[in-house]
Image: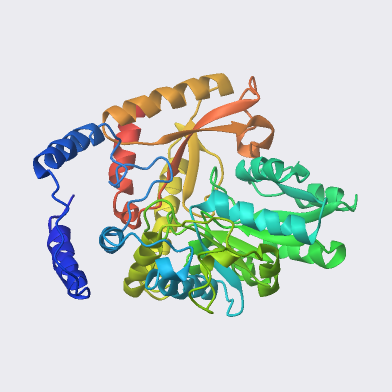
Amino acid sequence: MFDKKEIEILQKSLSRLQEGFSLPKWNPNEKWGDVEKILLEVARKMQNNYPYFHPQYAGQMLKPPHAVARMAYALAMYINPNNHALDGSKASSPMEKEAVSQMAEMFGWKNYLGHLTGGGTIANMEALWVAGKVHPEKKIVASELSHYTHERISGVLGLPFEKVACDTLGRMHLKALEDLLLKGDVGTVVVTLGTTGTGSVDPLTDILELQKVYGFRIHIDAAYGGYFTLSTALDNQVKEHFNNISYANSIVVDPHKHGLQPYGCGCILFKDPEVGRFYKHDSPYTYFTSAELHLGEISLECSRAGASAVALWATLQLFPLTADGPMGQGMNNCHKAAMDLYSKITDNNNFVPLHMPETDIVIWAPKDESLSQISKRSKALFQKCAAQNIHLALFNYPTRLLPDHWGSIKKDREQVTCLRSSLMKWEHVDWVDRIWEIVEKEAS
């Protein structure tokens, strides 16, 4: 599972890196005995983890970075560049610009403003910050199943925020949205393409039609689902929403989710490069070294890990962002794994699914007569499966959003606890049978 070949390649790469510096020999005189002792203790402590890296882990949204990303990140850390200003990131800033251009092109943008961030939260904060500058004092709205970060960030920015009700498929309800738009105080609609809870895709195509009438900004939160733009396996209607991403005003996507990157690596993109005027500032000691754009001039963050840019750039050399390449096939695998698991659930009368997966997240529960009993059995099955090294997750879903096929179940709670699987590893498509075999056995 932890291939020593990586260490061999990294050692060769370090030798190549050292050849580029003609400097006097310098030895920091490390006490390697102490270092080894500490690292062995770190390894022991790190054993206290679920096997997030293994396909039998099918719970939370945890995906191991690809070996090329791990090695490139480690290699860059010997330099430890800071992608704030060019004099601290002569190599890694150009690599970031190149990588971000490929991210933008994945969504059909050639003219844009964007950069990497420390994660999706900061990326979304920049999007809403700009939204507040374009439409000051106007409201931010997002679906009730959108990521909680939008409400929290709106509070931090001092912007009014309101949740939009969802339908029984976990998507933003169009009628509920239009009711809010009629009030005339909505500046930005956050459209989630792949919610982190259920994987649901908001109806972007229809929301774009509403935009023509009400003139609001559209921010796409594709932190989780963005890479599904490359998938050819999605339902036609869902695929249409992804195909229309290019009409949005801003997009957030996290390479540290489906993009095979270490945490934290987010990306914010703006369709109109002119929003860069909101970032305008000066620095007395970092921006004088070059007339070229310093990434810190278009970022709310100051110091940022250049190693993240190096790792993403290296990964994109191996896995270009094309539908007909390994990345596109990998996203197809994720969706197929989810559909395979969904089929097994629907074929078994002892379980009840929530709804057909639109991306790669599946929600289901052991069937029983009441929501209280279902919640109790879900928690018990979660524990039993974990004891067999099959790791799922738990998810609380609002009772009022349950689909019709849950109609005969007694609604004695406002929320029901279900089982949840994020099948986001490309290899999951080959492991669904084994996962289900143990789930089925432990549920009997």
Q: Identify the residue at horizontal 74%, vertical 48% (top origin).
A: 141
Camera-side residue of 342 and 145: 145
Q: Quadrant of the C terminus?
A: top left
Tell me if 392 is positioned left or right of 407 in this view. left
Count of all numbered marks drawn on residues in the image: 0
| Image position of 440 (left or right of 30) | right
Q: Return the x and y of residue 293 as percentages of the image width and height.
A: 54, 75
Residue 329 shows up from this direction = no
Task: Tell me which residue sits at (65%, 30%) in the image.
Answer: 399
**Residue 135 horizontal side relative to residue 29, left or right:** right
Q: Quadrant of residue 237?
A: bottom right
Q: Is residue 95 above or below residue 203?
A: below
Side of 257 relative to 296 (left or right)? left
Q: How is the image coloured?
A: rainbow
Where's residue 361, x and y in %?
A: 48, 47
| Looking at the image, residue 431 lies above or below residue 313 | above
Q: Residue 43 appears at what percent x and percent y? A: 19, 38
Q: Position of residue 248 (x, y in %)?
A: 68, 67
Question: Between 13 and 268, which is closer to the camera in this rendering?
Answer: 13
The residue at the point 18 percent across, 40 percent down is 39
Could you say which is closer to the camera, residue 124 or residue 224? Answer: 124
Residue, far right? 183
- Would residue 5 be seen by someone viewing this image from the given angle? yes
Residue 388 figure quarter: top left
The part of the image, by quadrant, that contains residue 4 is bottom left
Residue placed farthest to the left in the image? Answer: 33
